[in-house]
Amino acid sequence: MKDLLEKIRREALAKMEDSENLDRLNEVRVAYLGKKGELTQVLKNMRNVSPEERPKVGQMVNETRAALEEKLEEIKQNIAARQRELQMKAEEIDVTLPAKRMKVGHRHPNTIAQAEVERIFVGMGYEVVEGPEIELDYYNFEALNIPANHPAKDEQDTFYITKDILLRTQTSPVQVRVMEQKKPPIRMIAPGRVFRADEVDATHSPSFHQIEGLVIDKNITFADLKGTLAEFARELFGPDTKVKFRPHHFPFTEPSAEMDVTCFKCGGKGCRMCKDEGWIEILGCGMVHPKVLAMSGIDPEEYSGFAFGVGLERIALLKYEIDDMRLLYENDIRFLKQF
């Protein structure tokens, strides 16, 4: 894997250096850093890397990406400067005309937050897995220990296409599909869009995003869950962040908890952001219910695991101090350019 990453790095840098214009440079960027680029393919193949090597490989991928992005920006600026110089020599400029401003797009706050979360967990050896947004009722509810008459179904009222097909209410069905198809050990996160029949307001939307994680292996305990999520919180919100766990109930985990983090605005002293409590609820988690393991073909006597789920919009709202979720969907350049 190290040789492959070094080969990708050499080839990408060489092609960047040979790029004569921004169009060609963008083609190189897409080929190596895009959604279907070679570096992205390496990330998708993390499942083939042994669990012991994943943290090292994840770190190498992050370092390679950072080096390529830095070089890409440097060459982009050089090409742009050369093009401006040639244009200045070739054109006569009427300085009395009003200037034209070029509107450049920005990465969406959700995209920035998702990339940050993926970076943290890939660095821990997790793989990123995606699944269908149109899901079977079985995977969305039954396989997660939520039978037809369970009250949790009312809490997750969603959009049904047929009696057995719906728009997923969570990304947990991806975890079930992975457990059915892959033998432990499993370490994965599943980001994606989900749907619930919620009214639109400052904190709710019928379409939003979640990132859920799953670990299945021998001798996994609640202590592993706490240590993993505490490290995640420190990486995301700062090294001084503390966490606490409050008992809760989720049908697919037992025991279950909700995790709070110390307010990163006031350090836990109390402020407007944390409503003077010093703590902010960030995610739900718990040990995977033995029944869920059994339904997915995993022996609960031999294996155990933990799962967690966090709303991507919630991370973006907290991290960037946005007080209205609707701002994320209005495509107002005045708002987006702040990020």
Image (spheres, rainbow, N blue to C red):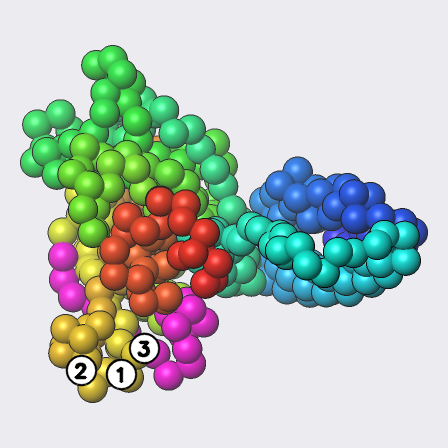
Q: Which residue is mark 3?
A: 264
Whether 338 is drawn above or below 213: the answer is below
Circle 1 packing at 10 Å, graded few (<14), some (14-19), many (20+), is some
Whether 239 is drawn above or below 106: the answer is below
- Can the viewer see residue 9 in this picture? no
Q: How many marks?
A: 3
**Looking at numbered disc 3 in the image, what kind of residue is underneath it?**
Phe
Look at the numbered disc 1 and give the secondary structure of its residue.
loop
Circle 2 packing at 10 Å, graded few (<14), some (14-19), many (20+), is some
The furthest residue to the bottom? 269
Q: Which residue is mark 1?
A: 266
Q: Position of residue 209 (x, y in %)?
A: 35, 44
Q: Residue at x 78, y 56 (%)?
A: 93
Look at the numbered disc 3 and give the secondary structure of its residue.
loop
Q: Which residue is mark 2?
A: 270
CA distance separating discs 3 and 1:
6 Å
